[in-house]
Amino acid sequence: MSVHAEYRLELQEYIAGARLARKHAPQRSWKSDLMLPFIGMLIDAVIITIYQLHGLRMSTFASGNCIVLLIVCFLPSLPYYKERSSINKFKKMDGSKPISVSFDEAGLTLVDTGRSEGRYTWPTILKMVKGDSVVLLFYSKACCWILPRRIFADEDWERMRGYVDAGRNMA
């Protein structure tokens, strides 16, 4: 029996899915999260050095403790930048176009209106993660589809989980 639904992903669902995906996908190293602040601190260090080379006086505080101050001020803002990144990605996706999804015993079909259509067998879905408002279907270690839970009834989600588990056992 085939189950079909059409939906538009809302911003809050996308953000919830991105947060859930960060928990379940392989994590980047902490070094990559600090790359942007490091570049900013490097630029500040270059500016301070240029001032000192030209004989301009800067206070001891500015030249000695500027980098420490930048680290302390910038680190708490990292979650904000991750959230902004999710919002910007969502805006680029053009969430106003409906997405059609259907599944049966053979696999999953996703149709992104006007852009792409894909048919995926169950062994290609690595895992299924259910959140409060979204369900993630991972098709690689770090990539997933975000589906709102509202589009299917609970028994349909359980049937899909059965297909994913059976496909994983076949792979």
Image (cartoon, rainbow, N blue to C red):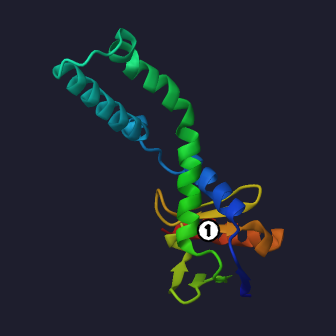
Q: Quadrant of residue 70?
A: top left
111 is higher (above) or lower (below) than 140: below
Quadrant of the image containing the N terminus: bottom right
Direction top: furthest residue: 60
Left or right: 33, with 137 as reference point: left
At x 32% / y 16%, what residue is drawn? Answer: 58
Which percent across, then down, holds residue 114?
A: 54, 90
Which percent across, then down, holds residue 86?
A: 57, 56
Q: Nearer the viewer, residue 167 or 55?
A: 55
At x 63% / y 74%, what residue is drawn? Answer: 95
Which percent across, then down, holds residue 48?
A: 28, 24
Q: Which residue is mark 1?
A: 164
Q: Nearer the viewer, residue 120 or 38?
A: 38
Left or right: 140, with 59 as reference point: right
Q: Is residue 4 visible?
A: yes
Q: Quadrant of residue 127?
A: bottom right
At x 45% / y 25%, what residue is drawn? Answer: 71
| Kind of residue indicated by mark 1 | Val
Q: Nearer the viewer, residue 34 or 73?
A: 73
Left or right: 33, with 50 as reference point: right
At x 57% / y 41%, what residue is drawn? Answer: 79
